[in-house]
Amino acid sequence: EVVGNQRRKLEVAGSLSLPDGTLVADGKAVQIIPGGDQLKAVIWDMDGVIADTAPFHFQAWQEVFRKRKIPYSREVFQRNFGKRNDVIVRSIVGEGYPESEIEAILVAKEGLFREKAAGNLRSFPGALELIDELKEYKVRVALATSSPIENGQFVLRQLGIEDGFDITVWGREVTEGKPSPQIFLLAAERLNINPKNCVVIEDAVAGVTAAKRAGMRCLAVTNSHPGEKLGGADLVADSLEDVNVADIAGIFNSPKKE
């Protein structure tokens, strides 16, 4: 029996099943999710979406390049945020730089990042709560990050969500970094879900582009870039505190941005 009906919520007495049979409530408020039958999975980026890692990445890059007398600025950092580390280094040092030295830079940088971030990492407001809410609605959750596995697992442990995702994809598991769609397509493959039923949550321009190239919908959050730079996303939010499952599912009710 429906005893109350507010925006996006029903107060029920007894049990209630939605028409597709996927959601049952028992004497509590449940959200009505328009487009919920199309939403099967949400694929999360990590840096800049779940975890506020940017200050520690910048400090680590700055230190490792300063020791080698290579110019490095915040503008360069901002432009490359979200890309794979090996791609970032090669774009800065140029062609002909010894591969052994590139590898040394990568190892040194990641060690510095973990050293600086240990005990200091925080999640962005609303991120962990949204992950939990998605699980409540039986939406699969995946992590697809450009970070190497050592960093990714470190960040998840720091935030206490090392077992928080159905599957994970790390940066070195694909041959092309964002804006290539490879990482998101691999996530969908591991989930065994059609890309058209996936929503990616991103904060970077390269990530938004990768999501769209994968044939997925995209929610962008303005943690790292202003909204006008993320216009390719289907939905842009200033904070994940302002987003719930109904908002994400509702993306499918709007014309898809290519």
Image: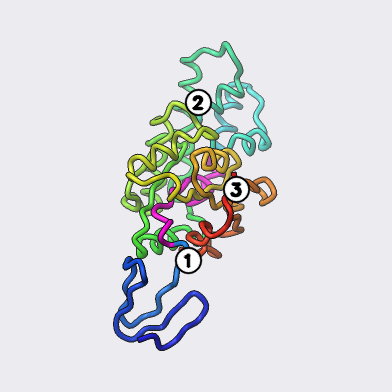
The amino acid type of the residue labelled 2 equals Asp
Instruction: Give the x, y percent position of residue 208.
Output: 56, 43
Which residue position holds label 2? 86
Q: CA distance from mark 2 to mark 3?
A: 30 Å
Q: Nearer the viewer, residue 253 or 182?
A: 253
Instruction: Return the disc, 1 or 2, that comes first in the chain's sequence.
Output: 1
> Which of the image's four quarters has the N terminus?
bottom left
Q: Is residue 43 on the magenta stretch?
A: yes
Depicted 72 relative to depicted 141: above or below:
above
Which residue position holds label 1? 34
Of labels 1 and 2, the one closer to you? 1
Over which residues does the magenta segment extend? Answer: 36-58
Q: Residue at x 43, y 80 (%)?
A: 10
Instruction: Return the disc, 2 or 3, that comes first in the chain's sequence.
Output: 2
**Res 97 → quadrant:** top right
Q: Nearer the viewer, residue 222 or 103?
A: 222
Which residue position holds label 3? 257
Magenta: predominant secondary structure element?
loop
The amino acid type of the residue labelled 3 equals Lys
Q: Pointers 1 and 3 in contact (CB under 8 A)?
A: no
* Secondary structure at numbered mark 1: loop
Q: Nearer the viewer, residue 222 or 25?
A: 25
